[in-house]
Image: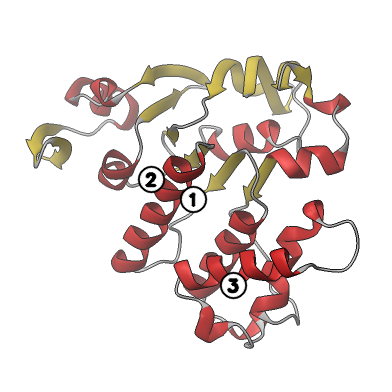
Amino acid sequence: MLEARDLHFSYRPDRPLLQGISIDIVPGSFLAILGVNGCGKSTLLSCLSAMRKPDSGDVLLDGAPIATVKRIERARKIALVAQHSHANRLTVYDAVLLGRHPRMSGAPSIEDYDVVDDVLARLELSDYALRYTDELSGGEYQKMALARAFVQQAETLLLDEPTNNLDPANQQEVMQATRDEVDGRGIAAAAVMHDINLSLRYCDRFLFLKDGKVDALGGREVVTPERMKSVYGMDCDVIDYGGRPVVIPR
């Protein structure tokens, strides 16, 4: 269980960004973190993954303050796909295999190779295995980064704009793969998202941030025309289509 309790964070003392955020990243659930640009979504993810230290409040991993958990143990429990990654001169296969490092006690085992092969196949990256990561398009690199997180087999998956740079078909593929990972392994996942309808299709919990605070946290029932107006300043309708809500701008 990954939890945040009364988190406060600011880059400047006179400009607070996160103000009293409390959430649970629940096993078996896929949380969408939503809000306007600059509202603190990615910063919240950084605090949850211990990449940034909050000014006050606590991030708890299985009940323990995350700063007290050894780095290797954190890596076994939390996998992060950051928004901005940098290519290097590794093959796709080797770059994904690096995600197994927290699980290795020495050289890669047959199990490690099998896990990498399976994830590459699931994300349709097998044909790219011997290509170098600095030769990939932005979308291909994004899928490779997701594959590296999947092979980590962590209990919590944190994704910062996982569909960035992806065409619509690949957006669906990545979100479905994440949903399958959550359902198949019973893990927790949280993703910073901008596409409300993509979130509604694949996520089951929704966190809206506004002015550095939690505006709403819950299931699909919190996605309402009133909330879209309040958070985004957008007039819209929320209709039922195929058994799930869809947001239609007016």
Residue 209 in the image, given as x and y percentages of width and height:
45, 25
* Quarter of the image with the C terminus in it: top left
Instruction: Look at mark 3 in the image and give the residue it sits on.
Output: 117
Residue 167: % across, % down = 34, 69
Which class describes the residues within 10 Å of circle 2: few (<14), some (14-19), or many (20+)?
some
Q: Are marks 2 and 1 in contact (CB under 8 Å)?
A: yes
Task: Give the percent coordinates (x, y) of residue 99.
Answer: 71, 60
Q: What type is the residue that disc 2 sits on? A: His
Q: Is residue 226 left or right of residue 239?
A: right
Q: Is residue 67 left or right of residue 207?
A: right
Picture residue at 64% right of the left edge, 69% below the top:
114
Q: Badge 1 local density, few (<14 within 10 Å), some, or many (20+)?
A: many
Which callout, 2 or 3, points at the residue further toward the start of the chain?
3
| Quadrant holding the N terminus | top right
Q: Which residue is mark 2?
A: 194
Query: CA separation, marks 2 and 1?
Result: 8 Å
Q: Earlier in the sequence, mark 2 or mark 1?
A: 1
For image coordinates 70% across by 64% down, the residue present is 111
